[in-house]
Image (cartoon, rainbow, N blue to C red):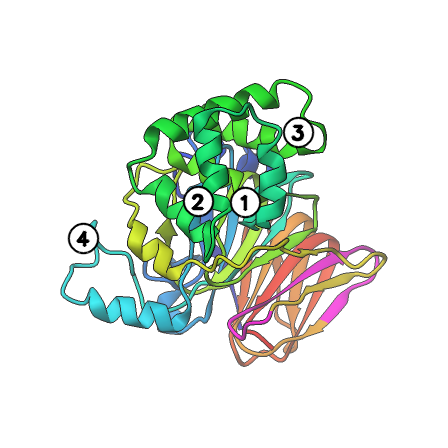
Amino acid sequence: MLRSLTNVPRDYAWGSSSLLAELEGRTPTGAPEAEVWFGDHPGDPADLADGGTLDQVTGGTLPYLLKLLAAARPLSIQVHPTREQAQEGWARESSLPLDDPRRNYRDANHKPELIVALSDRFESLSGLRPVADTLRLLDALDDVPGVRSLRERLSGEGDPLRDAIGWLLGGEAQGEVEEIISAVVGAAGGDAGEEEPALRAVAAIAETSPGDPGVVVALLMNHVVLRRGEGVFLRAGLLHAYLSGLGVEIMAASDNVLRGGLTPKRIDVPELLAVLDTTPGEVPVLRPTVGEAVTTYSVPVPDFSLQRVRIDDAAVTLDVSGPTMVLATAGSVHVTAESGEETAVPVGTVAFADADERSLTLSGAGEAFVATPGR
């Protein structure tokens, strides 16, 4: 059976006032529109055409949450727990009400996620840069005391990235933080050579979050720019932040977030450091398959699978297993079930097929993303 899903955009302050409206071909509301959730998570289950919500159909059992995400300014720097960490944290906080601001864990699930760019440019911070590379970047800054202090932290023994992040967020380094930010802004306005794109990105973050220690944490992270159709997978423990752009995001069905800056919300530094994986390195960019109608984004988790389907003259039939979502992102998309049932999928909405369906045929002329449980 096929069902149509919609939802109201969430109005987080970092949301874009235009990107979702442009995607859907409607007049902007003027308010920030940040995320549209297509799932059965109790935080915001998707709406059904008959007036109900998806959780009434699934019983809240979907293993994944599919979203449209539209960022006009940086999201918080954040990290998500492993399943074991989430279960332990959920049990530890069981005496706190779900809406208690002291809570770190909203459920007992992990939250690996994948973001795929829909805009021509999607800017993010993904993972921690190798320390040697960050030290070279610091060489482009004026040698002020704050920069020297950060360099010393990063040159220490043991786990220098964990030590540096704890120092920056701990509340005792605000003077050094402001010196480093000033040095970054100065260097970004000059000729910083190959370091210039990263420095410009961090300087832009400083404009929206002046004096925030997270600006300096951003200096320790990989600056990643995705083009349309490119994606990155973010494993549990990986520090990240989306900076700007429109994308399709899929994740395990969880709302567990540990924040590390660029937010007025609570930051629990000890818990963040306990969850954080400080293994540095580049995060691989997943690229669309050239010349093929279907791109599968390979992810190492069983919670979800995501495919991008480009439809032209020929229809595309996909074998599916488990509850499936087809999110239209361009053009005119129709979905036909094996039984012959057919539905149009307006851009920015989802056709949901229950677990009884074994194949779906996409036709028309456009683009869609197909989400299923992992394979």
Residue 133 visible, this angle: yes
| 288 horizontally vs 98: left or right | right
CA–CA distance in space, label 4 to label 2: 21 Å
CA–CA distance in space, label 1 to label 3: 14 Å
Which of labels 3 and 4 is toward the front? Answer: 3
Q: Could you say where residue 302 lies in the image, as x and y percent from the top left?
A: 54, 75
Residue flagged by tag 3: what amino acid is it? Glu
Residue flagged by tag 1: what amino acid is it? Met
Q: Could you say where residue 308 lies in the image, as x and y percent from the top left?
A: 69, 59
| 80 horizontally vs 248: left or right | left
The answer to the question of whether label 1 and label 2 lie on touching residues, with beta carbons closer than 8 A, is yes
Q: Please, what secondary structure does the residue beneath circle 3 have? A: helix
* Residue marked by disc 4: 100
The answer to the question of whether label 3 and label 4 lie on touching residues, with beta carbons closer than 8 A, is no
Which of labels 1 and 2 is toward the front? Answer: 1
Mark number, residue 221: 1
Q: Could you say where residue 253 lies in the image, as x and y percent from the top left?
A: 42, 65
Residue bounds of the magenta highlight: 300-317
Mark number, residue 34: none
CA–CA distance in space, label 2 to label 3: 21 Å
User: 268 and 171: which one is in front?
Assistant: 171
* Residue marked by disc 2: 77
